[in-house]
């Protein structure tokens, strides 16, 4: 079978019917008649030589082959939509959409946005914070900041390493003298990151994993750090991005323990994208990251 033998124009019809589980519902969504939907599905089945639906009276349920094909068609259509969106954006102003977590957006990139525009006056950097790892095959993001390693489909520019340490308001730090003391305080936990960091800190110090006295969940690390500033409990911060929160006296580091994050902080983008000077932007990112003040060693507790 050749690709030209398959009526590809009918794939959206199949996707709608399979997703909605009804030819009538698909007809209403696509502004067609149920008869037209049925005819297009039949033509697609004839071309493929495979029944996609089991028809019983007025109902039509996907066959096993149809269910598997639906997942592949949906993935392909999503990829086409994303590609079309990226193509349309190329004729507009030069907007570079960058995805990163809220902490990096607020504490690293936003304070340096003016400098970025001075270095790259023809580019509007649009920063969007999200905890979700960007799928560059489906999204229209142009670049991202990530922590880790192993993205062979992307061009990766390593900016540097990062560490994690427990932080709290200075007034709470006096009561925390060892890792096990963390469990006596409320854990301010962004999406499970805090619990993973607490478990790793306890294991690194040879302490049996314990449960925090209380856990308050937050959507982002940024929110958890703000709660820690107000004395609501203990959380974990990523350094050197958060160093200024400590040296300014807003937060304390009650323990000398530091956990190295695996991999590195990286600036990533599609290798085939030539619309932006990514190498120059990566060099700027690297310079900015290296300029961040390092967290002092040991306990860092501002005097009240």
Image (cartoon, rainbow, N blue to C red):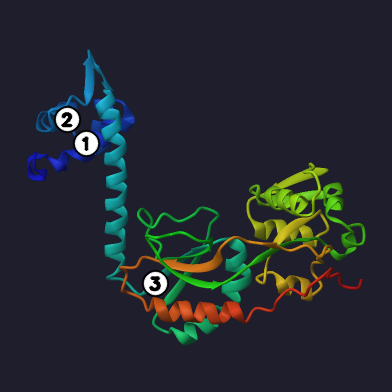
Please name the residue shown 70% across and 76% down the image.
294
Task: Tell me which numbered mark, 3 or 2, is placed earlier along the sequence.
Answer: 2
- Which image quadrant: the N terminus? top left
> Are the residues tagged 1 and 2 within 8 Å (C-beta)?
yes
Give above or below for 64 relative to 160: above
At x 88%, y 62%, the residue is: 173
User: Which comes sooner in the sequence, label 1 or label 2?
Assistant: 1
- Tell me whether the residue at label 3 lies in contact with that at label 2, contact meaning CB atoms closer than 8 angstroms: no
Is residue 168 depicted above or below 186 in this figure? below
Residue for point 32% across, 74% down: 275
Q: Residue at x 34, y 68 (%)?
A: 271
| Mark 3 lies on residue | 95
Q: Which of these two is toward me, 233 or 166?
A: 166
**Numbered mark located on residue 13 in the image:** 1
Regarding mark 1 in the picture, which secondary structure is present there?
Answer: helix
- Return the residue nearer the eye: 46 or 114: 46
């Amino acid at each position: 079978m050749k690709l030209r033998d398959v009526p590809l124009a009918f794939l959206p019809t199949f996707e709608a019917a399979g997703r909605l589980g009804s030819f009538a519902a698909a007809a209403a969504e696509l502004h067609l008649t149920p008869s037209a939907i049925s005819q297009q599905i039949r033509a697609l089945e004839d071309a493929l030589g495979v029944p996609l639906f089991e028809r019983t009276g007025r109902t039509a349920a996907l066959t096993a082959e149809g269910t598997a094909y639906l997942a592949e068609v949906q993935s392909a259509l999503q990829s086409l939509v994303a590609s079309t969106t990226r193509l349309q954006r190329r004729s507009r102003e030069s907007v570079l959409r960058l995805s990163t977590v809220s902490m990096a957006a607020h504490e690293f990139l936003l304070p340096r946005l003016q400098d970025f525009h001075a270095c790259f006056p023809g580019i509007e950097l649009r920063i969007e914070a999200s905890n979700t790892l960007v799928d560059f095959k489906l999204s229209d993001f142009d670049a991202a900041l990530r922590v880790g390693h192993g993205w062979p489909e992307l061009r990766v520019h390593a900016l540097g390493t990062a560490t994690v340490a427990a932080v709290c308001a200075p007034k709470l730090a006096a009561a925390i003298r060892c890792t096990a003391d963390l469990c006596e305080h409320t854990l301010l936990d962004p999406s499970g990151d805090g619990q993973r960091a607490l478990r790793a800190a306890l294991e690194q110090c040879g302490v049996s994993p314990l449960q925090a006295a209380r856990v308050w969940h937050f959507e982002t690390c940024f929110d958890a750090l703000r709660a820690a500033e107000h004395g609501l409990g203990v959380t974990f911060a990523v350094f050197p991005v958060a160093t200024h929160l400590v040296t300014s006296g807003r937060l304390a580091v009650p323990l000398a323990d530091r956990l190295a994050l695996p991999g590195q902080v990286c600036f990533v983008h599609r290798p085939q994208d030539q619309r932006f000077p990514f190498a120059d932007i990566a060099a700027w990112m690297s310079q900015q990251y290296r300029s961040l003040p390092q967290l002092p060693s040991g306990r860092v507790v501002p005097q009240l």
